[in-house]
Amino acid sequence: MSTHYRSLTLLLVFLLCASVGGLAQNIRDSRGNDFWLAVPPNDNSSVTASDPAFVSLLVATDTASTTVKVYARRRTGVTDTIVAIAPPSTLWEIRLSQYALYQLQGVENVNGPSPDGEKPSPASIHVTTSHDISLYAVLRAPLTSDAWLVLPTDALSTDYIVTSYTSDVSQSFGSTVVYPSQFLVVATEDSTAVDITLRPDRSDRALGRNRSVMLKKGESYLLQARVENSRRDDLTGSLVTSNRPVVVLSGHRRAQVPVLSSTSSRDCLIEQLPGIETWGRDIIVPPLELPVDASIVASNDVSVCRVVAANDSTLVTVNSQPPYLLNKGSFWDLPLDQALVFSSTKPILASIIDRSANRSGGRLTGDPSMIIVPPVEQYLKSYIVGSVGPNANGRQLYTTHNISVIVPTAAVPSLTLDGSSSFMSVRSIIGTDYSIASAIVPPGAHRVRADSAFGIFVYGYGPAESYGYTGGMAFERLYDPVIRLRALDAAGNAGQRDTVAIIVDSVDKRNTEALAGMRSVQFRVQFDATSFVSRQPVELDSMRTVASMWFTKDIMTIAPGDTLAMIIGNHTLGIADSSAIVVDSATWYSGDRKPLRIVTKYVPGALQCTNVCESGDKQRLFDPRVPAPVMRQGYYDIRGSYVGPTLDGLPPGIYIRR
């Protein structure tokens, strides 16, 4: 009998493609077409009509004109909609001049009120675009500003560790003004459950380390450190976990860096944090180019590099010195007066916190800003970045704009800025195969490329103001363990009993701590209900053609070849003689039923009915093209086999005459 296999039904093709998509996905990076953010507290005490505060969204486009839609929701819940067309290859500004409508309000004085502290707020900003862009946000008030790279929703996470800086206070007209370490969370979906574990034993609003809140789509949640004359907490090391992807914006209301005197200048710090799963083990931190009028008053009056650990027992080596031990959430501050080359046994996060430029008043160029440092593992070969260029009443806020890159020394000849090799300085980093290249650039969009992957930093200075952010990076899940599940093929004749099995195909043990804490897994299996009839209960779709089954499996250890599920049933002549067995939607849990950061990939199986043939457009269990056998008259045994025209010489038995 000849057998011909037909194509899958449309739905099953879709399911198969979705499963195969788990094997080969596009790299997650900082460009996208859907973004969420909110506006954290800043010090707006010096705002005047001639020196305003505002929030700007800067859209860095590629080669196509791009429609930008901004849905800015006020603290009152009212949404303002802005639609703009950004020209190609430009940095297009959308300014929200009425910043106070959207900015969350926190504590400003010791024991003072915090209108939006630790409660859901409707204030947030949602940006969608017709083409992929890089998006930057600027929060500006007189003498205190910063900017940050806004991450697209596909680069968001459910697990974060906060990096910030030490809280500070100052005396002003008889009251104590507080400048707290702070962070905020923005939900991108409804029913987002957020759990927060603080590093200090209290926050500005309440005692205790644990917070839990349920947020609706677009709601924000602000948390600030407790600040008193004798207490200056730091929220660095606080944990944020959620059941759905969220934005975490971390920073400081107005930081002095490092903390040296009460008269030093301060600036707000803002950066959007990357999820823990994107942290790396190899990081190179460049010293920032100093403003031309920089004034250093002491040996410790330098910018700071802060390193935070994702796991306990993390050994961190810098510039080949003896390793430093960090536990989960603990941090290490180092002076950034030279290039710092980190290597660690487990993932870490590094940030640059630029120095205070003015130690005794005045308006020297520069002030604190915060920059997340991309790990070497997340470098890319090409970036479109934006150098911030907003003005206030015709006055440029930032007078100097810098781009610095960490690039393999061998790739320096291929490094281009806006199509030319215009980096003003290139210097090698001792003990490595990398170099630092720097350039002063005009405000606007810039394209930077090289033949090898490199890291990029964008920053700038004005009188007692600054901004800084990473120009971009990949957001791959680097060191989460990867488990591949496979659905085994199942083939048989119509009516034949068979078993569909789901097994562990491979285990990539990148994070043994996560695997050690694994206690169960839940996943789904789908197959053609018309081609395989399960003896176990199934859920059917509305067409009653696709069967779904959910499985929960308790596990203590996991290894390739382990069987996670078995479905017993029978092959049938269905709507397709070949279809997909799809396994997906796996979630791995710890003993207390908390989801673990484990990447699951899937290999679909094939479900086949092997004794099906085709005649025209119809399926049959016999081949109509083969002539039917001619019935011979005589005797047949009980199996239907012809034995002869007579019974002569046959052994005793039961025979049928036909």
Image (tube, rainbow, N blue to C red):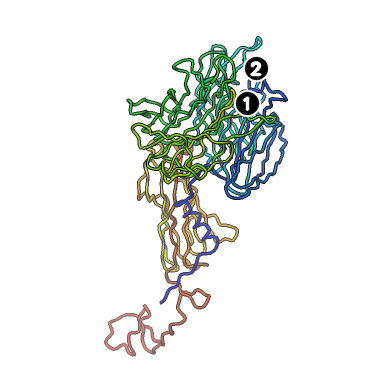
Q: Secondary structure at mark 1?
A: loop
Please provide percent x and percent y for residue 91: 61, 41
Please provide percent x and percent y for residue 545: 55, 61
**Quadrant containing the C terminus in the rendered view:** bottom left
Kind of residue sitting beneath label 2? Gly
Q: Secondary structure at mark 2?
A: loop
Position above or below: 242 against 647: above
CA neighbours of label 2 inside 10 A, class few (<14), some (14 to 19), many (20+): some
Of residue 607 and residue 361, the one placed in the foreground of this image is 361
Q: Residue furthest top?
A: 174
CA neighbours of label 1 inside 10 A, class few (<14), some (14 to 19), many (20+): many
Q: Earlier in the sequence, mark 2 or mark 1?
A: 1
Q: Residue at x 71, y 23 (%)?
A: 48
Q: How many marks?
A: 2
Residue 120 in view (yes/no): yes
Q: Which mark is residue 564?
A: none
**Quadrant containing the N terminus in the rendered view:** bottom left
Of residue 250 and residue 629, the one placed in the foreground of this image is 250
Residue 273 in view (yes/no): no
Kind of residue sitting beneath label 1? Pro
Q: Is residue 78 left or right of residue 134?
A: right
Q: Residue at x 69, y 28 (%)?
A: 100
Q: Viewer-nearest of labels 2 and 1?
A: 1
Q: Mark 2 sits on what residue?
A: 112
Please provide percent x and percent y for residue 564: 41, 49
The residues tagged by marks 2 and 1 sit, at their Cα atoms, a distance apart of 14 Å
Please provide percent x and percent y for residue 248: 55, 33
Q: Mark 1 sits on what residue?
A: 41
Q: Are marks 2 and 1 in contact (CB under 8 Å)?
A: no
